[in-house]
């Protein structure tokens, strides 16, 4: 097969010839398959620094694995059901591995038994073990493995539940009827049932032990003397736990990206695991390896060897019995080993392509506003750590107790000890969050607990809009610059760059410029809005203070080495009127903003049932206020009901509309109240009702399950702000029959669930500059939620009218849209369903990580490179001037 030169070509042939169900099972990943691509893509971001003039005449690729010498640092990973790819399946793989002098790992779910594989002849073989609920089954299997001469057990720790492999669901994957899971054939566990989704997922749900923990590892050690390698480790914490429990080795693996999507590529976490192991056990890696250079990148970063996962299947399919051994030999010894010349004798040093030219491998994210209300900057920090592999310091001003943290979703710890400052550490991706409250300054050591009772800012604005750009509190005004200077210039390690949010502009841009000069760091400004326009809301555009503020903002903004902005309109304004070249980085929703499942909806509604069932006004279509809440059954909510184990959406449920507001003058909540009143009156007129009609008629229909042509509307308003009490009082005075309001402040994990459970979002945001976009709408889109939004100059960059939402300029227009969208709800509201469908198609492909990788990462790298190049040029010119001065002095003397 000389014409096939690499793994990708083998895989292409397999794709063309294998049945779709089989190929998809072998080749696919979980959900969006981001991690599947990242496993391979991550290797491409790592570069070599080759050496020359070194003797390469002698090559030795042999290594020792658990005391067994093998021919190369490449082994065969456990892969299930190989006879779907080739009639000889695991037989052929075992023979090929033996002929090549390396290790083959047999899967528990193999289509050849341990005894059959052992009969193929001598060889070093490991056995991958899945722990069944019936421990007697596991014990029997371990005994058979020992008798068959296997040398070690690979314990899988990340597959107690099968990941959502959507291709398997679509294909209704199951083991072909002519095959069985041979190791369990005599135990009536060797077949998979045909089901509506994935037969494997159903099999695992029935048979595999979900309670797998440290006690099971100890139990396994008690029944066998074989060394145990643990597979599925991705963090330093789990590395230490594995070593503490006497693991013989660790395999860094994300299960071929088939379990949980949006976890890092394995090569990206390898160094962390190696560092945590401290040389006490060997560390191996699987996932993403496609070329010999990938092997050596892994070895250079500390791996003792690598396991090939899908490669073996691609080669297996392309061979017949006569040449499978040859194919494996060619692909392993030829393609993967060719680069060994450079590995052994060129002393290759590896660095990550994403590491900036500054070589400090560090970026400081600066938000001198409430970091809790700046999710975009938190996402920046996560991407810098996860996608660029940098250490990240976040310096923020905690005006609202840092109550909003998307970072919580990634393991950020928070200590609530009443201190005025704290340092939070993300143990997985090296993020340090330095939080201070003006006027005080206090720093504690890094801490690691998990968050408790954390709350998310239900008003997800890009900047701290409830904080004046000139910081209204006098103590804070004088203290923030000093605290910021201390943190940026002294407290944190010198970064390659400061990534700073604007606004607030004063004192942020001034302080960051000082820090940049003192620490020789680049400045990158992320323009969320213009600070002077926010100040103008209270002082007026003609104010002298506004003019001074604009001058400072423009002057210091021009000093940045790179700029990001949120819209094309803002990009144009910066370019034409400020002389600043900026790259557009649109906000995109992170992965935890998604549609909620029916079970999640029901659980959420049950958890907030007290708020839902509390009357809120003169009349209330959720609770009538006369006889108390019409529903006191905890299994029944206004939207759902549980019958046995089944959860059902009520056909006459109210439509749920969510609006997130800061309760400030720049969001006119009165528009929403007027629109709600108009909807209520128009529906009453269409149904021939008037004020004299008794509420009992409506309540009889509601409790009797009657469906009205226009549904009741329940508005849930989230957020905090200065005008909240004023509008709550106005709501209580309204006399509405078919519209109800609730105001809430939700737990961090509940806010995305609320958006994912709603039927429509309403956005009242009007930009102070007319050039930014509401991030709350981005979050709603991530949950597949159509939005009605106030129209202004650049909003169409986000909302595509009639495709993902509608725009309104008055309360009357909003009322018209509510009537149109909800006519015939919940079954016949075609326009609403169409917009939701459009959103679901788009959101599956566009997320923050993709947008950041394509637009922000190159800009950040380029800005840092440019800064250091300019710094070197300045240094050279300075040295040249010094030499001229010295020369002149000598001549004069």
Image (spheres, rainbow, N blue to C red):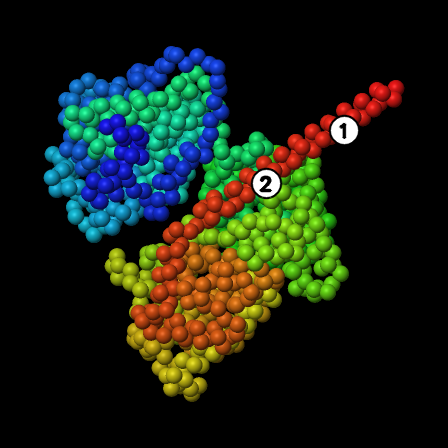
Q: Nearer the viewer, residue 522 or 648?
A: 522
- On the image, the x and y values in percent for residue 183 come to 16, 32
Crowd band around label 1 with a 10 angstrom C-alpha radius: few (<14), some (14–19), many (20+) = few
Secondary element type, mark 1: helix
Residue 250 occupies which quadrant of the picture?
A: top left
Residue 12 occupies which quadrant of the picture?
A: top left
Q: Nearer the viewer, residue 463 or 578?
A: 578
For the point 70% across and 46% down, the residue is: 510
Q: Is residue 181 above or below residue 409?
A: above
Task: Say which residue label 1 marks.
Answer: 881
Crowd band around label 2 with a 10 angstrom C-alpha radius: few (<14), some (14–19), many (20+) = many
Quarter of the figure that contains the C terminus = top right
Task: Say which residue label 2 marks.
Answer: 863
N-terminal-most mark, 2 or 1: 2
Mark whose residue sits in front, 2 or 1? 1
Secondary element type, mark 2: helix
Q: In screen coordinates, is 173 left or right of 771?
A: left
Q: In screen coordinates, is 657 left or right of 460?
A: left
* Total numbered labels placed on residues in the image: 2
């Amino acid at each position: 097969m000389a014409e096939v030169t690499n793994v990708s070509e083998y895989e292409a042939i397999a794709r063309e010839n294998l049945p779709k169900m089989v190929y998809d099972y072998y080749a696919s990943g979980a959900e969006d398959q981001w991690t599947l691509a990242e496993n391979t893509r991550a290797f491409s971001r790592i570069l070599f620094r080759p050496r020359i003039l070194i003797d390469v005449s002698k090559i030795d690729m042999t290594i020792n694995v658990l005391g067994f010498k093998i021919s190369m640092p490449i082994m065969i990973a456990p892969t299930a059901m190989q006879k779907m790819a080739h009639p000889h399946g695991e037989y052929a793989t075992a023979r090929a591995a033996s002929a090549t002098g390396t290790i083959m790992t047999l899967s528990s779910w193999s289509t050849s038994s341990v005894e059959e594989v052992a009969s193929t002849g001598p060889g070093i073989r490991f056995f991958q073990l899945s722990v069944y609920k019936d421990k007697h089954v596991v014990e029997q299997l371990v005994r058979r493995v020992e008798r068959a001469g296997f040398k070690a057990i690979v314990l899988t720790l990340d597959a107690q539940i099968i990941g959502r492999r959507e291709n398997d669901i679509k294909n209704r994957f199951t083991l072909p009827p002519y095959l069985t899971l041979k190791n369990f054939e005599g135990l009536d566990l060797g077949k998979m049932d045909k089901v509506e989704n994935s037969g494997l997922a159903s099999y695992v749900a029935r048979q595999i032990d979900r309670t797998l923990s440290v006690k099971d590892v100890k139990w396994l050690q008690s029944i066998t003397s074989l060394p145990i390698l643990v597979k599925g480790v991705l963090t330093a914490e789990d590395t230490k736990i594995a070593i503490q429990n006497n693991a013989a080795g660790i395999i860094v693996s994300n299960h071929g990206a088939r379990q949980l999507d949006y976890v890092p590529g394995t090569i990206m976490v390898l160094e962390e695991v190696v560092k945590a192991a401290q040389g006490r056990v060997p560390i191996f890696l699987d996932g993403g390896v496609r070329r010999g250079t990938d092997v050596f990148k892994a070895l250079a970063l500390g791996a003792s060897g690598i396991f090939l996962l899908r490669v073996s299947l691609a080669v297996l399919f392309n061979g017949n019995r006569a040449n499978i051994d040859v194919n494996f030999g060619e692909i392993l010894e030829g393609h993967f080993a060719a680069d060994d010349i450079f590995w052994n004798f060129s002393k290759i040093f590896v660095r990550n392509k994403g590491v900036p030219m500054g070589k400090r491998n560090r970026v400081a994210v600066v938000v001198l506003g409430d970091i809790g209300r700046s999710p975009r900057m938190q996402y920046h920090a996560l991407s810098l750590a996860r996608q660029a592999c940098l250490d990240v310091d976040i310096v923020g001003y905690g005006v609202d107790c840092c109550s909003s943290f998307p970072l919580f979703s990634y393991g950020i710890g928070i200590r609530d000890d009443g201190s005025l400052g704290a340092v939070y550490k993300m143990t997985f991706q090296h993020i340090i969050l330095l939080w201070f409250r003006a006027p005080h300054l206090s720093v504690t050591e890094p801490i690691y607990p998990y968050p408790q009772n954390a709350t998310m800012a239900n008003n997800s604005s890009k900047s701290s809009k409830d904080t004046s750009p000139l910081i209204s509190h006098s103590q804070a005004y004088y203290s923030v610059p000093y605290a910021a200077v201390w943190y940026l210039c002294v407290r944190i390690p010198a970064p390659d760059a400061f990534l700073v949010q604007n606004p607030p502009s004063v004192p942020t841009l001034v302080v960051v410029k000082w820090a940049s000069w003192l620490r020789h760091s680049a400045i990158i400004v992320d323009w969320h809005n213009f600070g002077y326009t926010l100040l103008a809301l209270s002082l007026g555009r003609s104010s002298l203070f506004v003019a001074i503020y604009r001058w400072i903002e423009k002057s210091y903004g021009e000093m940045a080495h790179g700029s990001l902005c949120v819209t094309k309109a803002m990009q144009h304004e910066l370019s034409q009127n400020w002389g600043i070249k900026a790259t557009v980085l649109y906000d995109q929703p992170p992965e935890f903003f998604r549609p909620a499942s029916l079970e999640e909806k029901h659980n959420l509604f049950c958890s907030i049932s007290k708020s839902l069932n509390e009357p809120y006004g003169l009349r209330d279509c959720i609770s009538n206020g006369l006889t108390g809440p019409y529903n006191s059954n905890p299994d029944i909510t206004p939207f759902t009901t549980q019958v046995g184990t089944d959860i059902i959406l009520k056909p006459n449920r109210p439509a749920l509309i969510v609006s997130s507001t800061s309760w400030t003058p720049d969001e006119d909540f009165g528009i929403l109240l007027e629109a709600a009143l108009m909807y209520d009156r128009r529906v009453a007129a269409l149904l021939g009702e008037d004020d004299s009609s008794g509420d009992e008629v409506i309540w009889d229909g509601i409790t009797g399950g009657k469906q009205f042509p226009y549904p009741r509307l329940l508005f849930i308003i989230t957020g905090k702000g200065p005008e909240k009490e004023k509008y709550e009082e106005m709501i209580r005075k309204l006399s509405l029959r078919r519209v109800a309001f609730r105001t809430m402040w939700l737990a961090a994990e509940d806010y995305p669930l609320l958006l994912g459970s709603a039927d429509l979002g309403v956005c009242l945001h009007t930009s102070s500059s007319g050039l930014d976009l509401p991030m709350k709408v981005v979050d709603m889109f991530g949950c597949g939620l159509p939005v009605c939004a106030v129209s202004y100059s650049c909003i169409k960059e986000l909302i595509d009218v009639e495709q993902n939402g509608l725009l309104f300029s008055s309360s009357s227009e909003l009322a018209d849209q509510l009537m149109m969208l909800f006519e015939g709800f919940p079954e016949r509201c075609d326009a609403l369903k169409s917009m939701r469908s459009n959103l679901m198609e788009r959101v599956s492909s566009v997320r923050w990580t993709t947008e950041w990788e394509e637009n922000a990462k190159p800009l950040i790298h380029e800005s840092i490179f440019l800064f250091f190049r300019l710094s070197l040029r300045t240094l050279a010119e300075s040295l040249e001037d010094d030499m001229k001065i010295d020369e002149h002095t000598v001549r004069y003397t």
